[in-house]
Amino acid sequence: MKKNTLPLSGIKIVDFSRLLPGPWATQMLAELGAEVYKVEEPGIGDPSRHSYPRYKQNSVYFHATNGSKKSIVVDLREPSGKEVAKRLIEHCDVVVESFRPGLMKKLGLDYEVASKINPKVIYCSISGFGKTGSLSHIAGHDLVIQAMTGLMGCSPDGEAPVPGMQSADFAGSLYCVIAIQAALAQREKTGVGCDIDLSMYESLLNMCLIPLSTPFAKSAGYSGDPRMESFGGNPRYSTYQSKDGRNIAITLLEFKIWKEFCMKIERPDLIYQDETPADRLSTHGERGIIYRQALKEYFSQFTWSEIMEHMLKTGIALAPVCSPEEAMNLGHVKERGAIDWLEHPIEGKIPYLVNPLARAGLAIKTHHPAPLLGENTQEILKEIGYSEEDIHRLTSK
């Protein structure tokens, strides 16, 4: 695939962000064809370089969120670093930053300054709770944000286990990509950029329609009951244990599927013809107790592998709960090309996740390796107009 045919070909992005939300967003934008300059702190770089587990030099995490970018080392605390940052802003289309609200203003690199340097710049600030509001000063850690959206407060037993996925981080990433693409389209019409105050909290809250459906109903004067149940209270949308002690996830929601399943296991007594479409996402009341016991007994007769085989044969979503290793090695993952491999000059042959839009020709399928710290500093300085003498002045410290 030629990069100049991709949707964001020719778009230049200066990425001041670190860790997950910003870097994963800018990697997606790079996959869509943008050129991303990753600005990193001298000596340390993006802290995610040092996370566990690691390859030979840098972390799996870093490589998974920084492919196909260029790295430039800039000390934003020094006058010379601010000079370079402003020159980068002048020559780019988009700025992404994920510092605490107010820090870029202290550095003299906020949108107000950036828009004077480059009136067409699109400036996206990602933070935990946004630049305004009573929570704006709270650090944007994923667990705190998930806890405060109501997402973790839905368990029928009142427990709130730590989630296995950083939903707030990834929600912020996705809305960042959407916002930047929308802003670029708007700029085509208006000729000017915009300031995007992107809150991870609002990004995830905006995805919490099901958790919020009952309080929405109550706030409008309705009972809100029964609630839409997808949090473990519905016995037909839950997990059970197999004969060999493994977990099985089932989604027998639709009446037709439930009826077929009940006939298959020779339990026609579990079929209630008066079931309504709304019932499928409920606890099923007294029937639910009977359903849960029957399902528990049934799945305890089969091993994890037998359940997997059954799902493949019938197409009914009775899915073994995979470990991350099992998920990576599923035949379906290979058949869809969801994971590929690249040769890194230091780390060797390493895997990466393929953008799902690559199949449609909207994103690259093959990543370039994540950059070494400061690998492209001199190249980028030259691109934004610095002379050899100035490059030597800026990099000889």
Image (spheres, rainbow, N blue to C red):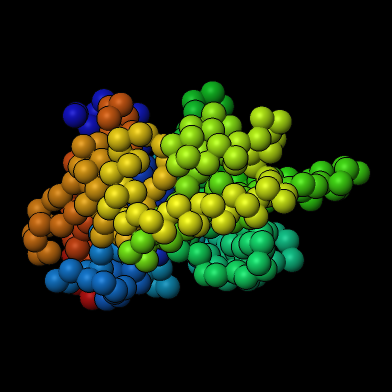
Q: Quadrant of residue 17?
A: bottom left
What residue is rendered at 27% in x and 30% in y?
Answer: 359
Q: Is residue 35 left or right of residue 367?
A: right
Instruction: State left or right for residue 28 relative to residue 238.
Output: left
Residue 270 in the image: above or below residue 160: above
Q: Position of residue 380 (x, y in %)?
A: 24, 52
Q: How many marks?
A: 0
User: Image height check: is 134 above or below 116?
Assistant: below
Q: Quadrant of the C terminus?
A: bottom left
Name the residue rendered at 19%, 54% in the picture: 351
Q: Nearer the viewer, residue 221 or 198?
A: 221
Out of 359 and 14, give the one closest to the viewer: 359
> Image point 66% across, 30% down: which residue?
273
Q: Nearer the viewer, residue 359 or 382?
A: 359
Relative to 177, say whether 106 is above or below. below
- Residue 198 is situated, as x and y percent measured from the top left of the image, at 58, 51
Of residues 75 and 17, the one nearer the viewer is 17
Residue 157 in the image: state x and y as whole percent.
66, 67
| x then y, percent, for residue 193 | 53, 38
Q: Is residue 144 visible?
A: yes
Residue 35 in view of the camera: no
Q: Quadrant of residue 132?
A: bottom right
For residue 39, which quarter of the picture? bottom left
Q: Residue at x 58, y 54 (%)?
A: 292
Q: Is residue 368 left or right of residue 276?
A: left
Q: Quadrant of the N terminus?
A: top left
